[in-house]
Amino acid sequence: MDARYREGRSLFEYDAAAPLEIEQEERPFIDNDAYAAYRLTYASPMGGPVSAFLLVPSTDAAHPGLLMMHGLGDNKSAELPFAQKFAAAGAVVLVIDAPFAGEGRRDEPPISFTERDRDEHIQLIVDLRRAVDLLLAREDVDPQRIAYHGFSYGGMVGGLLAGVEDRLAAYALIVADGGLVEHHTGPDDADGPLNDLVPADRERWLALMEPLESLYFVGHAAPAALLMQSARQDDLVPTTDAERFHAAASEPKTVMWYDSGHGLPAEAECATVNWLADHVGIDPARYASNCE
């Protein structure tokens, strides 16, 4: 195990025996024949509550679990339409807010280029690990069939999570790159916000964030399976960045490319559904987009 990975992994340790302090609303805000959706919070080991949606299928079986993460600048509501379809397909779905998506932060930029970015990046990984604890504590979740689904920033974060969290069977990483440093320092980023900083502040931010790059963690995801979907006309994740992320990832991995922008075509969604069906057993026939 390389020293950089070993030292980085230690940043995401937490007390797994601490109470989750789950507070779940009594009545679902969505309730139909297929699933019910609840708002809840649980305690972050870094302080304060984590806001989440929990979607629970109506059947009484042991279900796959699915942990979902939104993109940069979004919040959990952006993933709710997809979470509903995954719940209809038989998964217990948990969608959480990143720290920058909290009630007191939604009017602020998600990236500040200060030490806060490092603190919140670490907090998000720890909050996601606690979300795995929450799913594993449920009797209706099969502990051998839990997966992660992350879009854009959520996919990048998932690459890091995969290197430190070994209880998940599969990670679907959609239009992701290798980390915030990679995202802000490529040839296409010469006019980006990082370069608006004075040199000393720029170098300080890079030094703070570089140990947290997903590129250093995604190669330690095995034995979990990885799905990596990318777009050749993506104006947010250049092809070279995506290829570097793919190359860093451990096996088994499935890489899929699409001739689209950052928003992938419907065929990519169905490919994800069928890949998750193979790895954790969701039911494509019950997914709302007809992905059989």
Image: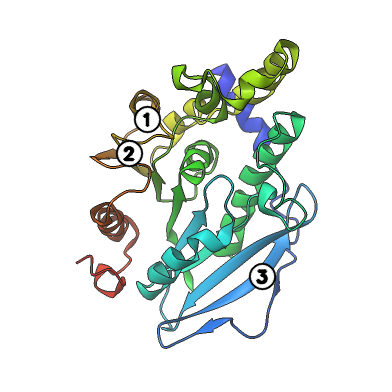
**Left or right: 133 with respect to 55?**
right
Q: Is residue 68 above or below residue 90?
A: above
- Residue at image position (51%, 31%) is 214
- Residue at image position (60%, 22%) is 210
Q: Amino acid at mark 3?
A: Leu
Residue bearing the label numbered 1: 242
Q: Amino acid at mark 1?
A: Ala
- Residue at image position (45%, 21%) is 188
Q: Residues within 10 Å of mark 1 (few under 14, many from 20)?
A: many
Can residue 13 be seen? Answer: no
Cα separation, mark 2 vs mark 3, equals 32 Å
- Residue at image position (63%, 23%) is 194
Image coords of residue 161 (percent x, y): 53, 41
Q: Are marks 1 and 2 in contact (CB under 8 Å)?
A: yes
Q: Residues within 10 Å of mark 2 (few under 14, many from 20)?
A: many
Which numbered disc flags the more N-terminal residue, 2 or 3?
A: 3
Residue bearing the label numbered 3: 40
Q: Residue furthest bottom?
A: 33
Q: Nearer the viewer, mark 3 or mark 1?
A: 1
State the mark number for residue 230: 2
Viewer-side residue, 257 vs 236 = 236
Cα separation, mark 1 vs mark 2, equals 7 Å
Q: Amino acid at mark 2?
A: Ser
